[in-house]
Image (tube, grey):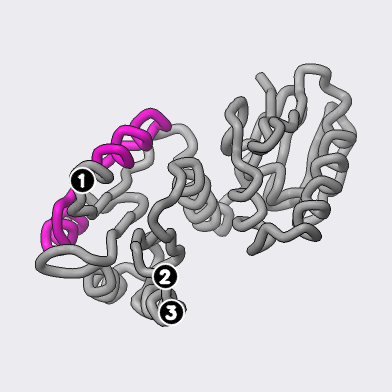
Amino acid sequence: MTQNKITALLAEDEETLAQIIKESLETRNFKVLHCHNGQEAMDTFYKVKPDVLILDVMMPIKDGYSVALEIRKTNKHIPIIFLTAKSQTQDVIEGFKSGGNDYLKKPFSMEELIVRIHALLNREEIASEDTIFAIGQYNFSRTKQELVFQNTIQKLTNRESELLHCLYQNKNRIIERSIILNLLWGNEDFFTTRSMDVFITKLRKKLDQDGSIEIINIRNQGYKLLCP
């Protein structure tokens, strides 16, 4: 999945938003199938078997929750992300009860959507195989939580491993600080922000054997992992 295009089925009846999402994902090595209503999404799903579903909650004919419930009868594993303007706790609970894996409230940043998609897809991959990521001269195993440089192995904590993987998925691009905090810590308060800064410092030290690698802080925006 890391080599081939990721096939995303996008069900969104708001045409302008759908085009923005479609075009943004297609620039990041996705193949996007856009459906305009829930029934069309159901029909397309059974024909194509995509890698991930991105479902708007409020759609004509069938809403996103109904689509998810139907799909979960035959497929328990495909990642499902809901997009919605609803923000009540009960709506979020209903989304997860219907089989959703994640929930993005409108408006959202494309970076956040892309990070969450990759997080869900890699969660599926990691159960079946250990993918080794080349970060400059380092080899990174997310499963074993190890960084290997030549013959030297450095063990990573779970938080270090998840943070490095998040940065790697967006290498050579800025990833917003708030996205990392909400994805890995669940909030973006003062204490989690300071905690993330500490982990960034630790990762910099563990990657300092290769001068071509750098984790830079983009003021008031986020971080960028620079690597070949």
Callout 1: helix, strand or loop?
strand
Helix, strand or loop under label 3: helix
Q: Residue at x 46, y 78 (%)?
A: 89
Q: Which residue is mark 1?
A: 34
* Quadrant containing the C terminus in the rendered view: top right
- For the residues labelled 1 and 3, the Cα–Cα distance comes to 26 Å
Can you tell which of label 1 and label 3 is closer to the viewer? 3
C-alpha gap between disc 1 and disc 2: 24 Å
* Residue nearest the viewer, comparing 141 with 178: 178
Q: Nearer the viewer, residue 56 or 219?
A: 219
Q: Which residues, given as a range, are shown in magenta? A: 19-45
Is 223 situated left or right of 120 in this image?
Answer: right
Question: Which mark sits nearer the N-terminus, 2 or 3?
Answer: 2
The N terminus sits in image quarter: top left
Q: Residue beneath label 2, please?
A: 87
Q: Amino acid at mark 1?
A: His
From the top left corner, tell me how far across and down residue 116 is, in percent: 50, 52
Point 32% across, 43% down: residue:
7
Say left or right for 97 vs 123.
left
